[in-house]
Amino acid sequence: MANARIENEPWPGYRDIWLQELDLDKMELVGARTLLWNGALKEASAPEAPHIYKVDGTYYLVLAEAGTFHDHAVTIARADALGGPYQGNPRNPILTHRHLGLDQAITNPGHADLVDTPNGEWWMVALASRPYGGYFYNLGRETFLTPVAWEDGWPVVNPGHGRIRTEERAPDLATHPWPSEPACDHFDSAALSHHWNFLRTPHEPFHSLSERPGYLRLRLRPEQLTELCNPSFIGRRQQHINFAARTAFEFTPQSTDQCAGLALLQNNDNHFRFIRQGEVVLLIERKQGEEQVLGTVAASGAHHYLMVEARGQEYSFYYAAAPEAWTPVVTKADGRVLSTQIAGGFVGAFIGLYASANGTLDDNVADFDYFEYAPLPA
């Protein structure tokens, strides 16, 4: 089941939603293709991401419509048979925030799923964004949860409110299967925690937790964060509008090409690199492929401490050669370089640990003692 582009579309963004059997052995579509629906709204663009649910004998087809930005919406149709015909809900869209204006805490909800819990509650999981510092969102499209009730055979999203709220009651569930991660990772485990991510598929090992127990060792390789490659970067998502992150690491450059430190990343062309390189610690902003050094301080010794504090779109960067002896490198740097609106794409920003030989084959490592991430009060 997919959205299909057609020839001679009656308006831009017109799509058909169709159903076809998938041969799982051959991984091929087989048999006749059945047209199910083409969306709820007249001249709506990009009906997509179709999901079908069977509830009390009725089939429900849920779509995202109107693109992925401010006009995004969730629409629904139903039928007595899987292949239709499908009747649209006369109250479509069942979820959107576009009518609320741009100045909202949560915008562009869409791409929704319906969920029923073991205790008989119904909920909707949807993507949406939290703009801040203007209509910019650095956290990308996040996952939100909102309650659902059923009336006249149709789902009603968050009755009495009709929207996703910034604070919501929790589902009635007996257990929570995912315990919270500690604020500080001391790298004492045999494997990385699940919240850590690589950039693209690593085809060769570049990190170790065993070569120096209690440290995360990153090997310096030629790959750079500015390239579409798999650099020596291990990151976790920025999850909060206001947060602080810090790390301690040991690193002595063997040439002026070598660097190690922190990176705040949206993509290869839009990020901050906060690194020890040569005899200095420097903050580099890369925006739409163009770089500038925002600040530098002299580096001292092999032990280094880096800290980033973000309050809204103001990101401040600090360096220390001894614990808690912080020196500001840059304060209130413009964090919008990490936003979807500047960098493109839909994913949120990452913050993590980075090392590179910047195109050379020098053999060196950086050993990170810990990484701490915690939200800050508004």
Image (cartoon, rainbow, N blue to C red):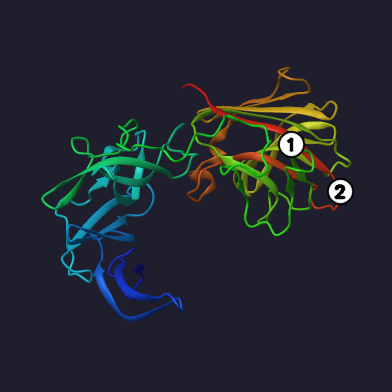
Indicate which label's residue lies in the foreground, 2 or 1: 1
Residue 363's label in the rendered image is: 2
Name the secondary structure under disc 2: loop
Q: Quadrant of residue 146?
A: top left
Q: Residue type at mark 1?
A: Tyr
Residue 374 visible from this viewpoint: yes
Considering only order in the chain, which callout, 1 or 2, is on the residue closer to the N terminus? 1
Q: Residue type at mark 2?
A: Asp
Identify the residue at image location x=26%, y=75%. 34
- Return the x and y of residue 3 as percentages of the image width and height: 35, 67
Identify the residue at image location x=76%, y=37%. 213
The image shows residue 194, relative to residue 327, as above or below, that is: below
* Left or right: residue 57 compared with residue 302: left
* Left or right: residue 233 compared with residue 357: left
Taking the view exactly as shown, the residue that stands out farthest to the right is 254
**From the image, which quarter does the N terminus lie in?**
bottom left
Answer few, some or many: residues within 10 Å of disc 1's Cα (few below 14, many 20 plus, some between 14 and 19): many
Taking the view exactly as shown, the residue that stands out farthest to the front is 174
Identify the residue at image location x=19%, y=38%. 159
Residue hosting label 1: 215
- Return the x and y of residue 139 as percentages of the image width and height: 48, 40
The front one of 151 and 293 is: 151
The image shows residue 198, relative to residue 107, as above or below, that is: below
- Return the x and y of residue 125 as percentages of the image width and height: 34, 46
CA distance for labels 2 and 1: 18 Å
